[in-house]
Amino acid sequence: MAFKPLHDRVLVRRVESDEKTAGGLIIPESAKEKPQEGEVVSVGDGARKDNGELIEMAVNAGDKVLFGKWSGTEITLDGEELLIMKESDILGVIA
């Protein structure tokens, strides 16, 4: 199913975190936190100013981004868990 977010919203796929610590300890599923890093899947057209002028999005599909711990709404599309969030919830793009 094709999905295009509206306005200034972004569709993000979480990037899986490592299963081991730097010291080599294996982290069980129950102790893992959800990653705060993801890849942008799709973006909306952008927000609009009061005069109707379009504000372009700062992120594009394919960008790796960092977002807040409680950002976005979890959705399932075609059996895949994704996040939909406002562009302002994204903290930055990972170079």
Image (spheres, rainbow, N blue to C red):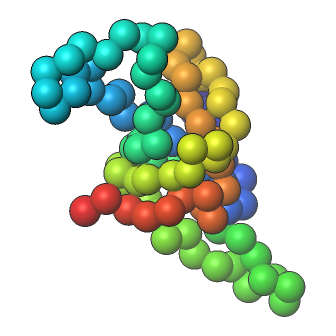
Q: Position of residue 53 (x, y in %)?
A: 74, 85
Q: Position of residue 66 (x, y in %)?
A: 43, 53
Left or right of 53 on screen, residue 89 = left
Count of numbered marks: 0
Q: Position of residue 81 (x, y in %)?
A: 55, 23
Q: Position of residue 27 (x, y in %)?
A: 31, 16
Q: Is residue 81 above or below residue 48?
A: above
State the image quarter where residue 86 is shown: bottom right
Q: Is residue 26 above or below residue 56?
A: above
Q: Nearer the viewer, residue 48 or 66?
A: 66
Q: Is residue 90 above or below residue 82?
A: below
Left or right of 79 on screen, residue 17 = left
The residue drawn where x is 33% and y is 29% is: 17
Q: Nearer the viewer, residue 46 or 75?
A: 75
In the rendered view of the protein, which quadrant contains the N terminus? top right
Residue lying furthest bottom: 51
* Residue 22 in view (yes/no): yes
* Residue 44 in view (yes/no): no
Q: Is residue 25 above or below residue 6?
A: above
Q: Nearer the viewer, residue 87 or 60?
A: 87
The residue drawn where x is 35% and y is 51% is: 64
The residue drawn where x is 43% and y is 59% is: 60
Q: Nearer the viewer, residue 76 or 5?
A: 76
State the image quarter where residue 84 is shown: top right
In the rendered view of the protein, which quadrant contains the C terminus? bottom left
The residue drawn where x is 22% and y is 27% is: 21
